Image (tube, coloured by chain):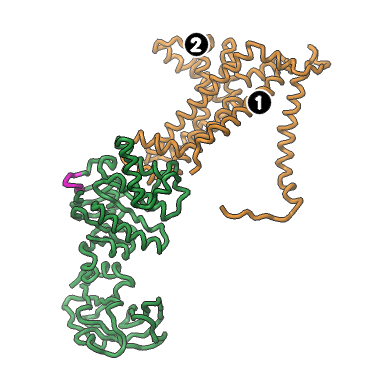
């Protein structure tokens, strides 16, 4: 590593980080502190006054069976979305490596879905699988599957997971392709000469060398599944049927903006923030240890 | 323990480019064959075809008497040392060496024994727990060698293994590779563009150019009797002096040996020249006047870059020299050290 150049200016460094700090303060710390304050307040039914109640909102939220259900839904949804999105993307990226003719076109086509807005993506899937008008729903019923995500919670979950991961596949694909390209071809050849069959080569050479990419995507996909899937869920199921697809972030919206229980909603968003920070910390603390950066 | 036989091997790439245009080489058991040539001559492609990393478009490649055209690299029982070493960066040195053995389902204690003995031979024993990036270039090179040796394959393939090392280390490893290959008695194919490596390592030397074999034989035979102007200018450093003949004469020559009828080029090596007073060398030999353009003293010898007979020549003189730029001096070459080539570049 080349030695760091140090400029002996006392004020300039602070000036240089000031814009970044200002943005973080205004758009993250201030709203976060507001959420924290709000989570300890209780509004009267008409929104005219509020009372400081300490942790009462948290107690209420954490003892609410609907909230516990929502945690479970989020866990299932996030794990499934991240797994499907990353698994499919990796498979497609490995396949794309083998494409010789029209590689560029193929890759471009693969990346397009990322440009589709979440709500639109949700609508696409909704139309395809709508029990009354969806063309694919028709096909499923023809296959003898009793397809009705408007009534069946599990089917609704499958649908939102499919829509959410479909949207993320292209992003993951892009990173996996780049990651695969960064692995020197001679390593694969050396492994072939060393007697490793294709499948073994993948698991013992390619996959470990992709670990930095995979780890990065794991963090990004978890955060995506937690936060950025609101639009899809809103468009496809609206959290239903019942509360089968009501994730934490969807419940924050529902309780705060639809039911106007601001204190509960704020408490939930604080909990959600803590969960995501904890998850990311765990990923960096434990998973990253298994990653080799070349 | 194996022979390698190439019979009229060709490689045509999908775009129609012919990288190897029909090469036949028979490498006897336990011998080291060096493929040498300029970049793009097809030597690496040929090596990769022996390895099974490239398909063979036409002709056959046999290892140990068995045609391996349709067999993948995994089953050919060969080992290859790559130019960039291709060590697995996420594995320790030990695992790098053990990988090939594990893939072949060897028992654990046998693997351990083999890896440790090989590491011992290559002085790698203290590095087994390190990862490739914690090693120096020379050490990485050794690990790459170790990974090949530990498997005791039928054939070793070397793809310019020393070109990433500094000059001193390269010389050292060259000697080591040679003695290891001798000791292990494994048939080897070695690709390089360095004529010094080629000369010193080869039992069988193959000079390639533009997808074809220019000359095949023992290194010193090739040095003494280059089959073409290409080989003459490729083997030997500095290369052989080549001067054009016009209607059987060399302009500016004081005396000439008998020139074969169809010769178009005359050649003599810088180290076969004598400078100054004419002695025995001039008996029926070549003698011409040269004007010195540059002098390069390298210690044990000096190189004189001269202009003579309408061309440029290099003359090697031992030790220091008093010759200065601008001097006119007579250059002599013995009759038996003068080579002639036809208009097609072939030796006559």
To which chain does the residue with label 2 belong?
Answer: A
Q: Is residue B285 above or below residue A262?
A: below
Q: Write down the quadrant of residue B251 in the picture.
A: bottom left
Which residue occupies the extreme bottom position in the image? B277
Give coordinates of residue A162: x percent, y percent: 50, 22
In the image, residue A120 lies in the stretch drawn in magenta: no
Spot occupied by residue B331 in the image (x, y as percentages of width and height) = 30, 85
The residue labelled by disc 2 is A148
Q: State which chain is coloured orange.
A: A
Element type at mark 1: helix
Residue hosting label 1: A274
Q: Residue at (46%, 44%) from the top-left corner? A: A182
Height in image: A8 above or below A231?
A: below
Q: Which residues are magenta?
A: B60-67
In the shown orientation, is residue B70 left or right of residue A147? left
Residue A253: image tag: none
Chain B display color: green
Give how far apart the Cα atoms at labels 1 and 2 are.
Answer: 35 Å
Residue B277 located left or right of residue B4? right
The verdict on a common chain for dots 1 and 2 is yes
Please say whether residue A278 is visible from this viewpoint: yes
Q: Nearer the viewer, residue A57 or B230?
A: A57
Q: Closer to the camera, A293 or A156?
A: A293
Most common SS among magenta residues: strand
Q: Which mark sits nearer the N-terminus, 1 or 2? A: 2
Q: Residue at x 45, y 9 (%)?
A: A146
């Amino acid at each position: 590593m080349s030695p760091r150049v140090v400029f002996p200016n006392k004020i300039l460094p602070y000036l240089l980080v000031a814009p970044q700090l200002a943005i973080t303060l205004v758009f993250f710390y201030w709203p976060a502190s507001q959420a924290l304050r709000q989570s300890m307040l209780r509004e009267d039914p008409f929104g005219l006054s509020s009372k400081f109640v300490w942790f009462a909102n948290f107690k209420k939220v954490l003892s609410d069976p609907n909230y516990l259900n929502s945690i479970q839904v989020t866990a299932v949804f996030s794990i499934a979305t991240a797994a499907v999105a990353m698994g499919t993307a990796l498979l497609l990226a490995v396949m794309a490596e083998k494409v010789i003719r029209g590689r560029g076109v193929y890759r471009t086509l693969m990346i397009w879905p990322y440009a589709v807005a979440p709500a639109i993506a949700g609508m696409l899937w909704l139309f395809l699988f709508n029990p009354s008008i969806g063309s694919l729903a028709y096909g499923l019923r023809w296959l003898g599957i009793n397809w009705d995500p408007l009534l069946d919670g599990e089917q609704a979950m499958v649908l939102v997971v499919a829509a959410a991961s479909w949207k993320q596949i292209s992003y993951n694909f892009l990173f996996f392709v780049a990651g695969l390209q960064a692995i020197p071809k001679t390593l694969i050849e050396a492994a072939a000469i060393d007697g490793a069959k294709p499948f073994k080569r993948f698991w013992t050479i390619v996959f470990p060398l992709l670990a930095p990419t995979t780890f990065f995507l794991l963090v990004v996909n978890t955060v995506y599944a937690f936060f950025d899937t609101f639009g899809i869920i809103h468009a496809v199921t609206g959290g239903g049927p019942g509360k089968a697809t009501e994730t934490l972030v969807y419940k924050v919206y529902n309780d705060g903006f639809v039911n106007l229980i601001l204190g509960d909603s704020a408490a939930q968003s604080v909990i959600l923030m803590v969960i995501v920070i904890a998850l990311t910390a765990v990923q960096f603390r434990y998973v990253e240890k298994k990653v080799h950066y070349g | 323990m194996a022979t390698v036989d190439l019979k009229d091997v060709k490689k045509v790439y999908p775009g129609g480019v012919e990288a190897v245009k029909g090469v036949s080489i028979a490498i006897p058991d336990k011998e080291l064959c060096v493929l040498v040539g300029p970049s793009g001559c097809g030597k690496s492609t040929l090596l990769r075809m022996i390895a099974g990393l490239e398909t063979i478009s036409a002709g056959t490649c046999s290892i140990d008497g068995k045609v391996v055209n349709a067999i993948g690299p995994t089953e050919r029982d060969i080992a290859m040392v790559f130019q960039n070493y291709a060590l697995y960066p996420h594995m320790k040195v030990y695992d790098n060496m053990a990988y090939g053995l594990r893939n072949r389902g060897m028992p654990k204690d046998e693997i351990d024994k083999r890896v440790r003995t090989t590491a011992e031979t290559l002085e790698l024993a203290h590095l087994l727990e390190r990862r490739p990036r914690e090693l120096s270039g020379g050490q990485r090179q050794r690990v790459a060698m170790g990974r090949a040796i530990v498997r005791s394959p039928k054939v070793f393939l070397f793809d310019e293994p020393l070109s990433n090392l500094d000059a001193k280390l390269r010389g050292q490893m060259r000697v080591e590779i040679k003695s290891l290959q001798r000791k292990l008695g494994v048939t080897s194919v070695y690709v390089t563009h360095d004529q010094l490596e080629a000369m010193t390592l080869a039992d069988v030397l193959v000079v390639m150019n533009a997808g074809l074999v220019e000359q095949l034989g023992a290194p010193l035979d090739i040095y003494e009797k280059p089959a073409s102007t290409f080989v003459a200018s490729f083997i030997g450093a500095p290369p052989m002096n080549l001067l054009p003949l016009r209607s059987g004469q060399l302009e500016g020559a004081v005396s000439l040996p008998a020139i074969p009828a169809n010769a178009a080029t005359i050649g003599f090596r810088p180290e076969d020249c004598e400078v100054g007073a004419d002695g025995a060398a001039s008996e029926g030999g070549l003698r011409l006047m040269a004007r010195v353009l540059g002098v390069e003293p390298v210690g044990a010898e000096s190189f004189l870059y001269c202009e003579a007979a309408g061309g440029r020549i290099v003359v090697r003189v031992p030790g220091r020299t008093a010759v200065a730029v601008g001097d006119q001096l007579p250059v002599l070459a013995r009759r038996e050290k003068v080579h002639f080539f036809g208009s097609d570049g072939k030796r006559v």
